[in-house]
Amino acid sequence: MQTNQTQIRYFIIMGISNDPQLQLPIFLLVLLIYLSILCGNLTILVACQDPQLHTPMYFFLGNLSIMDIGYSTIALHKILIQFVAGDRTVSFMACMAQMHMFGSLAGANLFMLTAMGYDRYVAICKPLRYHMVMSTGTCGILASTCWVLGLLQVTPFTVIVCGFSCYSSIEINHFFCDIVPFMRITCNDTSLLRTLFILEGLLTMILIPFLLTFVSYIFIIRDILRIRSSSGRLKAFYTCSSHLTVVTLLYTMLFSQYLTPNLSSNLESKKLFALFNTAAVPLLNPLIYSLKNKDVKRALKRILSHIRHW
């Protein structure tokens, strides 16, 4: 059945599973993960208010936490609403807005991790010039650029999708409005969108940030290996271990999710990867940065101490 856009007022989000027995466990799991994401990233944002953490690395980390809260909220809220209200529908405009905001925040997230990689490169490879290179103005420009690039790179996709006039179904086989399952339900020509998806989406949003981060770590590892003392090498590696862990985890999931031969196949497996990206990664970010970072722990202790005395 083909449906004209003028007749479409809403889409139906299929969710993670249609099995009635799995709805409650999925709801509880997603609710627990989402609340943990909020608590963890809000904790990072609170810790970053400590004067001793007013450094470029934690400035970028604060921005990253805001992005994690944003895109996990956009992606996961429909799962919670479906269970509580029993409503699987989403309006056409809300679906387009969700697709655009999710893509913007996800892209900005990758660019921000790239900026954090450059920050670690300067800190380890050019320590004497660190405060001059990573000045407040430079950090502001880098962070603003990440947000703007995230917004710009997804805009062409949204414009093209909004222009689609024919759909074979109103059921989106996903738990939020994402570009890949959307291409499967339209009966319009998607060749331009697929080309753009490969050239701009995968190349600009994933491969280029990955390569820039990879190059930064080539220089970082080179300089770490030049340090003569083992304690010095360990200390240098410790300063970038949290960022390296997050980057490795995120890009592994992204390559598994998107770099497949057929963009319209394996949607079930893609949903699992998408769930991991939108739930587990934002949850693990604050855990990795807080559990492995003594500065964050000390900052939280100082803030809690001030709250008690206040």
Image (spheres, rainbow, N blue to C red):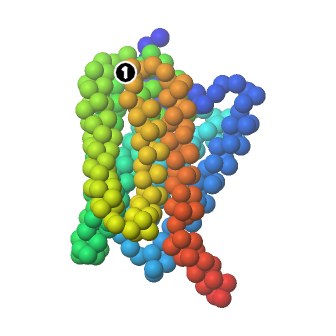
Look at 54% across and 71% down and name the residue there.
Answer: 294
Look at 73% across and 27% down and name the residue there.
Answer: 20
Q: Quadrant of residue 286?
A: bottom right
Look at 58% across and 81% down and name the residue there.
Answer: 302
Residue under numbered circle 1: 261
The image position of residue 164, as x and y in percent, is 34, 25
Look at 39% across and 68% down and name the residue there.
Answer: 229
Classify 19 as above or below 307: above
Q: Nearer the viewer, residue 8 or 116?
A: 116
Q: Element type at marker 1? A: loop
Would residue 41 be found to the left or right of residue 154 on screen?
A: right
Q: Nearer the viewer, residue 248 or 33?
A: 248
Would residue 143 be found to the left or right of residue 240 on screen?
A: left
Determine the residue located farthest toward the top in the rendered image.
1
Would residue 263 be found to the left or right of residue 294 on screen?
A: left
Mark 1, Cα crowd under 10 Å, few <14 / some 14-19 / many 20+, is: few
Q: Nearer the viewer, residue 229 or 246?
A: 229
Identify residue type, mark 1.
Pro
The image position of residue 224, as x and y in percent, is 34, 61
Q: Quadrant of the C terminus?
A: bottom right
The image position of residue 35, as x and y in percent, is 64, 54
Q: Quadrant of residue 51?
A: bottom left
